[in-house]
Image (tube, rainbow, N blue to C red):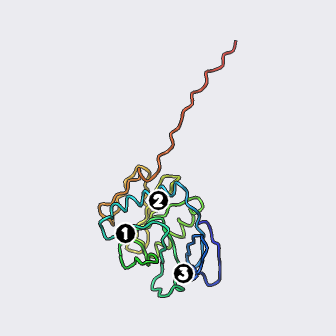
């Protein structure tokens, strides 16, 4: 998501969201609207590999893995569309409560959320989206940095707050505690680095 594109005093709701008929993708966070930029090739590569590894693990299990674009409506005790002021589209998510899965999207907090950041989304994902996922009760939140080849993992504590981040590099195996047996291989998540071609230095000049 690149930046806020609409503002109004009351804030935009899911009801407003449903009325927009253009081809752009948006997210609403606390009533403020953000447009979403087209993902890069690296973004899609990382997203696809994370989805593949998780989906393979959950193939014969009740939890379901979803990939963007799919709406997640985050609102506690909201009965009407115009009472919902946060609608997001995580890059990858795991949902175990079947009651949260509806045809229009996910209603309530997923069990695990993955956001893949870019320079234009870094501050929003690090600050705003981390806050709303924490408040909504997402049990585990991943921030993936394709450029730095790092994954930051935040786990929800008994106090309802994310604990200290756990940092993983591109050689790590991430064991996910809430899903016993699920391990994400970071070596397959991040595309291989380009090989460096070494050019031989020319021979030194000879002076007569």
Please give the label number shown on residue 72: none
The numbered disc on residue 47 is 2
User: From what the image shows, is residue 155 above or below residue 136?
Assistant: above
Give residue 37's position: percent from left, percent from top.
59, 64
User: Dot 1: few (<14), some (14–19), or many (≥20) neighbours within 10 Å?
Assistant: some
Q: Are marks 1 and 3 in contact (CB under 8 Å)?
A: no
Tell me which residue sits at (53%, 60%) in the image: 117
Marks 2/1: CA–CA distance:
16 Å
Along the line of sight, the residue nearer the viewer: 206 or 68: 68
Circle nearer the N terminus (2, 1): 2
Apparent side of residue 201 relative to residue 142 in the rendered image (left or right): right
Q: Determine the CA span between mark 1 and mark 3.
A: 24 Å
The one nearer the camera, 37 or 134, is 37
- Callout 3: SS: helix
Q: Is residue 159 left or right of residue 194?
A: left
Of callouts 2 and 3, the N-terminal one: 3
First along the sequence among labels 1 and 3: 3
- Residue corresponding to mark 3: 14
Q: For the residue labelled by badge 2, is the local secondary structure a helix, a strand or a loop?
A: helix
| The one of 58 and 103 positioned closer to us in this rendering | 103
Q: Position of residue 169 (x, y in %)?
A: 44, 52
Q: Is residue 110 left or right of residue 14?
A: left
At x 39%, y 52%, the residue is: 172
Question: Quadrant of the image for the N terminus?
Answer: bottom right
Question: Above or below — where is 198 with respect to 98?
Answer: above
Q: Spatial distance from mark 2 to mark 3, Cα to Cα? A: 26 Å
């Amino acid at each position: 998501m690149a930046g806020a594109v609409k503002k109004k005093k009351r804030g935009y709701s899911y009801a407003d969201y449903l009325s927009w008929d253009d081809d752009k993708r948006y997210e609403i966070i606390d009533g403020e609207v953000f447009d979403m930029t087209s993902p890069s090739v690296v973004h899609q590569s990382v997203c696809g590999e994370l989805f593949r590894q998780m989906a393979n693990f959950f193939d014969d299990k009740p939890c379901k893995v979803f990939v963007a674009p799919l709406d997640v409506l985050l609102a506690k005790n909201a009965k009407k569309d115009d009472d919902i002021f946060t609608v997001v589209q995580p890059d990858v998510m795991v949902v175990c409560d079947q009651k949260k899965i509806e045809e229009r999207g996910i209603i309530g907090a997923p069990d695990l959320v993955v956001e893949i950041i870019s320079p234009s989304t870094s501050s929003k994902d690090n600050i705003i989206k981390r806050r709303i996922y924490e408040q909504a009760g997402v049990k585990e939140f991943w921030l993936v940095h394709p450029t730095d080849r790092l994954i930051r993992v935040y786990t929800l504590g008994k106090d309802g707050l994310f604990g200290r981040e756990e940092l993983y590099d591109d050689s790590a195996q991430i064991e996910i505690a809430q899903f016993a047996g699920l391990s994400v291989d970071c070596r397959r998540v991040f595309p291989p680095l380009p090989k460096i071609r070494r050019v031989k230095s020319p021979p030194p000049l000879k002076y007569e």
